[in-house]
Image: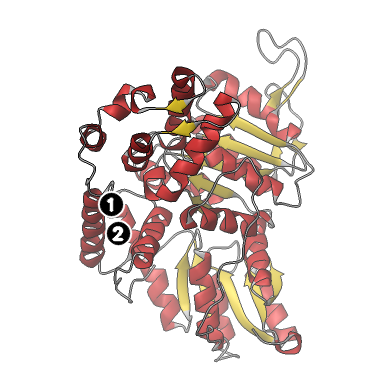
Amino acid sequence: MPTDNSTPLLLVVDDDAGQRSLLTTFLNTQGFKVQAASSALEALHALKQQPEIRMMISDVRMPGMTGLEALRELRQRQHNLPVLLVTAYADIRDAVDAMRDGAVNYLEKPIDLDELLTSVRNALGILPTQNPAAPAPITLPNHIIAKSPEMLAVFREAAVVAQSDTRILITGESGVGKEIISDWIHSQSPRANGPCIKVNCAAIPENLLESELFGHEKGAFTGAVSQHIGRFEEACNGTILLDEIGEMSPTLQAKLLRITQDGTFQRVGGSGTQQTNARVLAATNQNLELAVREGRFREDLFYRLNVMEIYIPPLRERKMDILPLAQAFARRYAKGNIRFSNQVIQILEIYEWPGNVRELQNAMERATLLARGEMILPEHLPQRIRQSTKTADILNGETNVAPAGNLMEEMERTTILRTLQQCNYNRTETARTLGISRRALLYKLQRFQALGYAIQSDIHA
């Protein structure tokens, strides 16, 4: 990276304060200087006043002048300034127009930070080092167990985005540890000393959830004998996690949209406007993009919440975490050290864990009770685990079983790469065809590359 005197100054343009905060924070950590603008007109003024700006990164859809219109006006006076356009609403016509008008690239939100960094470096002619440094070490608290490169990468990325105030959508199968990641983001943020409030949107009846989130005034409904402060007010200067956000009703989705836009809301039965600056995290095990297409989730709210997506891979795809997690859970429930038989170790590592970390935790609680603090044997494990096909092979003495999931992983890889080819290597279309989120697809492609599989180099957004 250049020395301080030659550090490139980048201009980030977005009407969303969370997005500006995310990009500014991330690019700062990569050694760039960043100036932010909240509108296209403000950006054009900054470019006129500061010729040292080396590149502009702009949202497309903004009130007033759009990013495309700003690009066209800029090209009338500055032909060579690199411009990178980003948008939550991918439109092939906009992409074609952007490239025709001289944009260096066109990225879709939620932004893949590695892809963003690569685009910026390519535009500025900054070559990556031939021997890139190993990922920076990350120190996790004792109660968090993560040994696999996959999960360490998740925690590392979460620590980076935690420094901004941007909204984050945490995705992954049920039981993978989304709440742990939300706690980590809060602890690593400037809001760490503030409250961290969690609301499970699926566990509270719809007629009570609005009051739980926004509060209510005395007499607002039968039983409202006093004023109630909602969770958003409690989370002021802190963080609020909206878990199982996909279960929220359309009516509440509309009301949530307002508070994510400007932090304002009304208590149930109240007429005055309240204000909160709570940082919003949302979590779901659903494919919200599919829910949007099916009309079950508001598109505008999806893009408000999904400024940055953090995808947590399932336990079966991070096998290095299985045994350390199992040992930690067993020690907790046994209140001391407890041993696993060799067969149990094999079973734990070969089982698919459809319920992920939550299923593993429950299995260890049951096993330690039956083992009575001594050694955990196969018969102490739940029946569904003992009766799985691969587990049965181990119990029957067939120890030369193929590594867990190899056949399924090969089928998944073949399906994904074939679909990529059919979709002309467009990742957004591929994810839509496969019925998974774009972030999940990116993770799987990165995983295939790490395993040594060749991936087509002309894959695009």
Quadrant in which the N terminus appears: bottom right
- Relative to 131, say whether 361 is above or below: above
Q: Amino acid at mark 1?
A: Leu
Left or right, residue 237 beside residue 212: right
The residue that appears at 63% across and 40% down in the rendered structure is 143
Q: Which residue is mark 2?
A: 430
Q: Based on the displayed image, in which of its 4 quarters is residue 441 positioned?
A: bottom left
Could you classify mark 2 by the number of other residues whose Cα lies within 10 Å: few (under 14), some (14-19), or many (20 or more)? many
Q: Based on the displayed image, in which of its 4 quarters is residue 363 positioned?
A: top left
Give the percent coordinates (x, y) of residue 302.
Answer: 49, 47
- Using the rendered image of the protein, determine whether residue 417 is visible from the camera's viewpoint: yes
Q: Which residue is mark 1?
A: 434
Give the percent coordinates (x, y) of residue 47.
Answer: 68, 82
Left or right, residue 323 beside residue 7: left
- Relative to 334, say whether 411 is above or below: below
The residue that appears at 42% across and 37% down in the rendered structure is 356
- Relative to 380, say whether 424 is above or below: below
Q: Amino acid at mark 2?
A: Thr
Quadrant in which the C terminus appears: bottom left
